[in-house]
Every structure is written in structure tokens, then in C-alpha cells.
Image: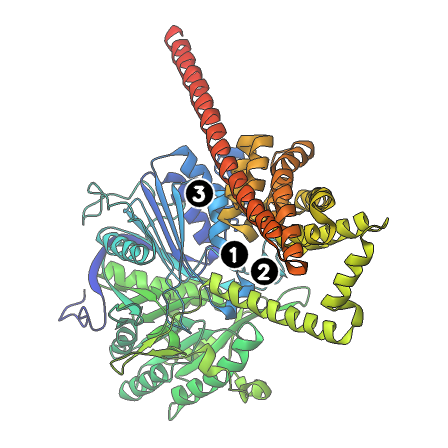
Amino acid sequence: MQSGKSIFQPGQNCWVESKARFSTPLIDCGNYYKALHSSIVKAKHSIFIVGWDIDSRIRLLRGDDEANSEANSEAPSVISDLLKWKAEQLPDIKIYLLRWDSSLAFFAQREMWAKEVWEEKTPDNVQTELDGTIPMGGSQHQKIVVIDDELVFSGGMDVSTNRWDTRDHPVVSEERDGPDGEYGPLHDVQMVSSGPVVEDFAKLVRWRWQRVAEESPIDMREDARIDDNAPLPDAWPEDYPPLFENVECALARTIPFMDEVEPAQEVRHMLLDLIGEAESVIYIENQFTTRQEIAEALNKQLKLKPNLSVIIVSSYEPKGKFECEAFWASRIEFKAILEKGIDPERVKLTYSSIEDMQGRRAYKRIHSKVMTIDNKYLVIGSSNLSNRSMTLDTEIDTVLFGNSKENQACIEQVRNDLLAEHTGRDIADMPAIFDNDSPVEALMQGQIAHGYVLTEVRDEVFTEHSGQNMFRALSDPEEPLISVPTFDGAALPARNPRRRSIMILIGLAIIAVLGGLMFWASQSIPWLSSDSINTFLEKSRGTYFALPTVLLVYVVGGILFFPVTVLSLAVAAIFGPIWGPIYGIMGALMSSAIMFGVGKLSGNAGLRKIGGPKVAAVDEKLKRSGIVGVAAIRMLPVAPFSLVNLVAGISSIGIFQFLVGTFLGMFPPMIAKGLVGDSIAQIWQNPSPETISYLVGGIVLWGLMIWGSQKFARFYQARKEAKSDSENEDSSSKSEVEKCAA
């Protein structure tokens, strides 16, 4: 630290004070992803990834880096393939992925069924959890990777879509390809560190994991080399030598009130206190500038320190209509507060843009969260200058101190490097600019025409949008959007709805709409009424149309996931105890064959995402048991009739085996259902002891068949598994003998 008393007080403006043995910023996502790939390849003990998003489809290496890696290494580029490879290479390594469970506002932008996708793509030593404990309106916004308890990545970058870019930020790039096509240039900053600070991050990620997971994570390594004199960790990324050495630091969090957790607004107080320390230059680059309290603090310090200059780099416009309408208005207010009563040559809120040699123009989207205070402090973290980052989202920022002349020079170098990129200059030209009496004006003047240039923000051109401020309370809240009252008169923040809750709500909405349409149709279209349908079925009895009618009912019912038991009982009630089961089994076989084909066409991954663990369970039974397994599943209430058909289509079982198993499993209970259905019809028409006894007998027979099938299936499965284990032991013994002989 610098001479004098530290301004940091744990519990107030920081969580802990610590120290980094080595540290270096990673500017722009191409560098971060390359460094992350390198460190994951070298990992030996554990990997923790905590993020706003962790998308399984992301390629960490691209272009020449990917080509060189494929030529010289077995390590894949795609993050899910890489973690699978690492987990299989080292079966004892533990990998933990903690992603925000998201909210309805981002539901369409994220990888669907992320937890199931990760579980499907990776082995058991890769564990995935979704954090749904964040208050309504807030988000899990920390971006942390801890490797082997010796190395930590932290800052503004997620392993997510629409993040990757190189430092030259070309207007057009084939590698900047997201789910919605090519996206524009994007700038971000991450940091990699080693030493004692890693222990603090390791505690943080384990605490976060423990709050949502059933199983505790692996203990921290007792032999982790994180002391003040530790060498460069084995997992340190290649091609990225450390910039800082033995640099003191502080960690500041934002923790909202969630599940009785003590809230923390350390980031908010840290930023305000750091601004109060500035004397020469405050440099900020941030995705959002909406927190008025920050603007007021900057304005106050500018008035207190006549030689102070403030440079802020943000985006030309936020991403998406929702953000635009909310943040344009807030930025106009932020800028007005910031500049009030200040010489315009001392303060600039800017954006970075480029026009290439072909006349194509692009605006660099700023996603980084960086601040330098003179050459005293460097902040790299996850916090935006927004209301939600100060109070409602989970955040973590690292503050590096200029505790030596070497580290002061490093802070200055980071600032100059970033501004050189934004202005199209060479970093060697930057010191002269800041030696100028008016560094802000010098920075804005003389920028090269063919590179990126900084331009002052003029949000007045967006007045038609900025006036629409109705979404600010939803996009940038300070408090949870919904609170739940308690018995003692207090109020607890409601959680963001979990993904499953969102899907249930969507499902209920769809059902309600379909139900309304069906009710309308039954009232408005005469032939869709229940009476008309019953009459239609009754008319088909005893005609050539009876069987086609039943087949049609089963096929349509299968597509709509209608319960097969209800169909069977209805057919038996209409066509009797003999023809009812015969027609029913023929209809069930046709419906099964059609849905089997649909499963073949849909593919494994899509259906697994929809069905989740139930799909996996049914698929496993089908693979292991063949015809007998299909027959057992048909008798047992394992899964819905149509779901079994679809899963069979994506499994390795053949159509002939499947249909034979379906016949064997469904025909006996179909007879029992025939007795039950016919008895119900007879009792309704002519109640008597005889018809009642038929009903009771049919129900008993049905139950006995289900019980018997359970016993047989368990017996068959136990014998098959015992045989498989015996074969594996024999094979293992044989292998050992061969090894010894060799």
C-alpha cells in the first residue's frame, strides 16, 4: 500500500484486504478465453466456475489459436468438450459449474435446459447447479474461475454467447458469430491472479456452491502454493506473463438480502471512497453509467480538486430495446449531474467507434468494469455503475494498490493501454498526453482517422427513446421487485422464479389458452361437442369404420400425450370386453410406431432437454432389458405412454423389439381394462351384482398383472445385471492375466 493509513475497512468498503503474488489484466475476450483454455488444460485438482452464464457451446479458441491447438494438443476448444476431456483424463479432478438460474427477462437469450445439457455432455465429476436464490429483479453477476486453489480469474467476462472478440475489434469478423448471427465489436477486461488472494476467492466460490447444492464441494488444498513467496502456479496461462508482482489488494462484494444472508454493499462504498482519493486522473470504462450517486461523487471531487480530470468510456448505445429505453434516460441524467458546474475540458463521457477502409462503421460495445484512480488504485470487477450492481446483484470487484513504484507504473500502463486501444494510438504516445495541462482535451484531439476514436456521448439524439422511462424500475432497480410479507410485519424479498417455475407457468398458460379454445370450439362447432363424439363412436360400432375410428383416436391421443388408460377404458366401454381390447392393442401399436418414428427424427439431445431425468431413466431401462424391459415398462407406471414411445425412438432398441415388447406388455392389462371398461358401462346401464363383480374382478386382475410384472421385471433385471457383472469380472481377470504374462 501507499504510505499512510489504509482507506479500506473490512465489512464497510471491502470484504477482505489481501495480496496477489502475481496478477495481470486480460484485455478482451479472445485473450481471456485463450488463457482460460490454457489453465484448464493444466488443471490437476479442481475447477470452480461461477458466472451469470456458462454456455456449453462456447469455443474458447478461434482462428489460428484453434488450428494450432488442434495440431499440437488433444484438448478440445469447445468449453463442454474441454471439461469432459479434462474430467475423463483425470477421474479424481472435481469440476463445479454454478450459473444463475436466470429470470424471465433473459429466458429466451440463454441456453435452454442448461443444467441438463451440461449433465448430458460431461461425466459425473463435473457438477452443475443453477442458483435461483437471488431476489426478484436481481441476478447472479459474479464472474469467477478458481483452478487448483492456486489461480483465479475474475472480472467482467462470462463464458457466454456474444462475448468473444480480439483487441483490434474489426468491423466485420466471421469468428464473432453468436446464436443470432454475427455481432458487433465488444470490449471487456478480466484478470488472472495467484497468491493469498486465491484463498479468498476459493472460500467465496465454495460458499456460493454450498448455498444451492446438496453435496459439499471438495475441501481446499492444504498444499496449495499461495503464500507471499510462492512461484508462478503450474496452471498459470501460457503467453500471459504477470504484470504485477506482490501487489496488495482488496475484494469488495455486493450481496443482496437472500435466504437470511447478511447483505453487503461493499462495492458501493469502495467506489465512493476511491473517488474521494483522486487528485489527478480518474479513468472509467463501464457498460452502464446510471447510478446518480456515483455521478454526484465524481462532480464533488472535480470541484474539490481543480487539477482532476475524469474520462469515462461507455457504449454508444445499450444492447436491446429494453435496456435502451431504460438506460438512455438514466445516462442523460448521470451526464448532467457529472458535468454540472465543471469546465467541459476536464470531463468527458465517451464512446469508441471505427470506420474501416471499406467505409463500414461499427460501435464498440463496452462490457468491462474498470476504474483507475491516478496511479494509486486499479479496479477490475463485475460491477456496473448501476443501481442494481450496488445493491441487488451479486458482484465481486478486485482493487489493486499501487503499493510500490513498480505497481504504480503498472496501473498507469493498464490505463494507457486501454485508452490507446480506444483512440487508435500507440501506447508509447500516451504518457505525453497525460503530461498535458488539459489531458482530456489532448486525448480527444489528434486521433487517427483509420482507427478507433473516442467521441463524446450526445444522448440528445435519442430523445425519442430517452423519454420512455417506464422500464427503469424493472431494468435497474435498487430493491427487489416483489417482497413477501411475514408474520412479524417485516418483508422478505421474493426470489427470481426458477427455470422450472417459468416453464410450469408457461405450460399452464398454454393449457389455459388451449382449454379456452377447446371450450369455445365445443360451444361453437357442433361436431366437436362430447355428445357428438360419443355419438360418432357409437355409430362406428358394428361397422367397417370401427377399427379406423379407434386407430385414429389412439394416434391423435398419442400425439397429444392423452393418457392411454383413459382411451383403453373408453374403447372397452363402447366396443365390449372382446373387441375393445383387440381394437385397443391395435390402436396402441399404431400410435407407438408413429411416436417411435417421431423420436427417431427428433434426435437424442432435443428430447433429453425436454424430458430431463425421466427420459434418461426410461432410456436406460430400454437399453438394458430389450423386449422384456419394454413389456415391463408398459405394465408399470414408469412414464407416460407417449414419452416411452419417443424415448424408444432415440434409444438403441429396434422397432420390431419395441412393438413386440409393447404387445406383450399391453395386451394382458388391456384385457383387464376391457373388463373394467365394459363393467362400468354395464353398471351404468344395468346395475347388478353380476356387473359389479365383473368390475371388481377386472380391477383385481389389473392390479395382479401390474404386481406380477414388477416382480418379473426385477427378477429379470437382477439376473441380467448379475450375468453382466460376472462377465466383467471374467474379462478383468483375463486382462490381468494377460498383463502379467506380458
Residue linked to disc 2: 170
How far across and down, in percent of the image, does residue 196 sit?
21, 52
| Dot placed on the residue nearer the N-terminal end, 2 or 3 | 3
Gap in angstroms between the C-alphas marked 2 and 3? 30 Å
In percent of the image, x 47 and y 74: which residue is there? Answer: 314
In space, the residues marked 1 and 2 are separated at their CA atoms by: 8 Å
Q: Residue at x 62, y 38 (%)?
A: 668
> In the image, is residue 523 above or below residue 239?
below
Crowding at mark 3 (Cα within 10 Å: few <14, some 14-19, many 20+): many
Task: Name the quarter where the C terminus is drawn.
Answer: top left
Contact between labelled residues 3 and 2, with CB atoms less than 8 Å apart: no
Q: Residue furthest bottom?
A: 341
Badge 1: few (under 14), some or many (20 or more) residues near its Cα, within 10 Å?
Answer: some
Which image quadrant is residue 354 in? bottom right
Task: Estimate the x, y position of residue 125 in percent, counting from the top left.
Answer: 38, 41
Q: Amino acid at mark 2?
A: Pro
Quote the CA–CA distance across marks 3 and 1: 24 Å
Tag 1 and tag 2, C-beta contact below 8 Å: yes
* Residue 328: % across, % down: 51, 82
Q: Nearer the viewer, residue 282 or 690?
A: 690
Where, by quadrant of the figure, is residue 98 drawn? Answer: bottom left
Q: Which residue is mark 1?
A: 166
Numbered disc in front, either 2 or 3: 3
Q: Report the side of 222 relative to 573 (left or right).
A: left
Front in this rendered view, residue 348 or 588: 588
Mark 3 = which residue? 83
Q: Mark 3 or mark 1: which comes first in sequence?
A: 3
- Tag on residue 723? none
